[in-house]
Image: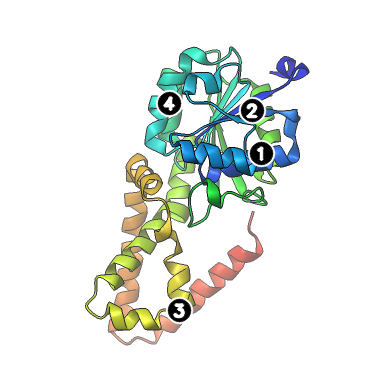
Amino acid sequence: MEQCYNNAVRLAIIGLGLIGGSLGLALKQANWQQAEVVGYARRYEAGSLALKLGAVDKVESTLSETVKGANIVIIATPILSIKDIFSQITSDLSDDSIVTDTASTKLQIMRWAEELLPPEINFVGGHPMAGKETSGVSAATADLFHNCTYCLTPAPRTKPAAVQTVKEMVKELGAIPLTISAREHDRLVAGVSHLPLLLSVALVSATTNNSSWHQMSCLAASGYRDLTRLASGNPEVNADICLSNSAAIVSWIDAFSEELQRLRKLVAGESIEIENALALAKKARQKWLKRRC
């Protein structure tokens, strides 16, 4: 991989939404490796806007042309479309090139990479722990990844030099690279990212489908807004998360349900212990805020 950097680097981004667009903006702003950034989007409007915003240097109309000659390929699409993308680009990838992704689940992605990508390709799974409730390239910003953890799950056959290249790219985004196994990633992220998404959705559904919602909506303030923020995310992207990490998510839903039932008993029984439960949760959250990675 080092040899290709003697010449101009070509970096391809497949998927020009919030994440792909923000990656392009950040890397262009940093002028990382003086790379030419080439983009691909399913919708012409997204590609055109990415070009106008300066997230990419050019936009190609096919996946084949996008990855041809690319030293690094970043796939920033909904999870369940990645398998098909792997199949389509495999014959056009350059030998010893790097392929990475930004999907919120990793185990399924790693299996597809092992199955479909040529052995000479260096695959490094990726997941930036960053995002917004708004989606699309119009919401992209160059600072989206600043100070966020960026998980990396290298394939066993990936060369150390390729992993190091991706780490350097991640640092250039302002993010903090963290190497982790795909299985452990999916288990942990299900609790701190995927479960909160579904809790947000459940709260919106429970309240807006209530016959009193019209009156309640006038009373809903910052607490309701903050707790329901994740429900405004991209439905396609979030559905793919649920479908590709179901076992881990269900496990966390069960754990949460048990805890909610414990709190229900305290409230229903008008137990003074509810104050202790609230105090313990407050203490745990404050401890987390002080020692965040």
Do residues under tags 4 and 1 come within 8 Å of each other at their CB atoms?
no
As measured in the structure, the alpha-carbon distance from the residue carrying label 4 to the one carrying label 3 is 42 Å
Instruction: Identify the residue position indicated by label 3 in the image.
Output: 221
Q: Callout 4, which amino acid?
A: Ile
Tell me the tag on residue 85: 4
As measured in the structure, the alpha-carbon distance from the residue carrying label 4 to the one carrying label 1 is 23 Å
Please name whichever residue, 167 or 185, is drawn nearer the observer in this view of the structure.
Answer: 167
Disc nearest the viewer among 3 and 1: 3
As measured in the structure, the alpha-carbon distance from the residue carrying label 2 to the one carrying label 3 is 45 Å
Q: Residue furthest left?
A: 211
**In the picture, residue 126 is in which quadrant?**
top right
**Left or right: where 76 falls relative to 206:** right
Q: Callout 3, which amino acid?
A: Ala
Disc nearest the viewer among 2 and 3: 3
Instruction: Identify the residue position indicated by label 2 in the image.
Output: 163
Residue visible at 30% across and 76% down in the picture: 264
As measured in the structure, the alpha-carbon distance from the residue carrying label 3 to the one carrying label 1 is 37 Å
First in sequence, mark 2 or 3: give its number: 2
- Residue 26, given in percent of the width and then of the height, sits at 67, 42
**In this picture, is 146 found above or below 196?**
above
Disc nearest the viewer among 1 and 2: 1
As measured in the structure, the alpha-carbon distance from the residue carrying label 4 to the one carrying label 2 is 21 Å
Inspect this view and state whether residue 20 appears. no
Residue visible at 73% across and 18% down in the picture: 2
